[in-house]
Amino acid sequence: MSMNIKKLVGEICYLAPINVDHAELWTEWMNDLEVTIPLGDEAYEMITLDNQRELINNMIKNGVHLFSICDLVTDEIIGRSMLLGIDLVNRTARFGIAIGNKDFWNRGYGQEATKLTLDYGFNLLNLNSIMLGTFSFNKRAIRCYEKAGFKEIGKRRQARIIGEMKYDVVFMDILAEEFESVFIQGLVK
């Protein structure tokens, strides 16, 4: 595997530009239902090494701002975060994140990686509004997003069905004026 390049550095993790060599980890994570059921469609898609390589290459080619989340101490790749659907006229984007390595769940990595990605979006891409969607059963993610500054803006009722259970999709967003940079703004003082 190639060396990780530190793009945005926090206190416990950093974001590195994604590399097609990371496809093996994505394949492992995206076939783990504990990881993918909270994410969405990945849970019922056929995930192979080849299609993950193709996905990463297409995302890079299409300008998705895509990062590997790495542990600051060990450099281990533990997840991914991204800004997609970027609209430079209206200055909007959608946010996505997955901590694929479950050893790093509930330890603050998701929250810090979210803040690093938001800092990148608001202070380098000059976005004004970043939104996301998650499922009502994903309480851990909702708490993480709220701690990062996201606010609920609506729900799509019963839009996710797993077995006999029906769940809402929760939409959240954050505005640039609501976000306080602790990473990038510290570099330009």
Image: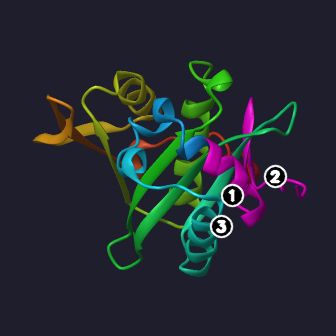
Q: Residue at x 53, y 36 (%)?
A: 32
Q: Amino acid at mark 2?
A: Lys
Mark 3 crowd level (few <14, some 14–19, many ≥20, 10 Å Cα): some
SS type, badge 3: helix
- In this rendering, the answer to whether 73 lies above or below 69 is above
Inter-mark Cα distance, 1 to 3: 5 Å
Residue 51 numbered mark, or none: none
Q: Residues within 10 Å of mark 1 (few under 14, many from 20)?
A: many
Residue 6 has which mark? 2
Q: Is residue 172 left or right of residue 61?
A: left
Q: Quadrant of the N terminus?
A: bottom right
In primary-sequence order, the first of circles 1 and 3 is: 1
Label 2 with label 3: CB-CB less than 8 Å: no
Estimate the x, y position of residue 188 in percent, counting from the top left: 73, 55
Q: Nearer the viewer, mark 2 or mark 3?
A: 3
Q: Is residue 112 magenta?
A: no
The residue that disc 1 covers is 23
Q: Quadrant of residue 57?
A: bottom right
Magenta span: 1-28
- Across and down, in percent, residue 60 comes to 62, 74
Cβ atoms at labels 1 and 3 below 8 Å apart: yes
Q: Could you tell me if the residues under marks 1 and 2 are in contact, i.e. CB atoms within 8 Å?
A: no
Residue 2 percent coordinates (x, y): 89, 58
* Label 2 element class: loop
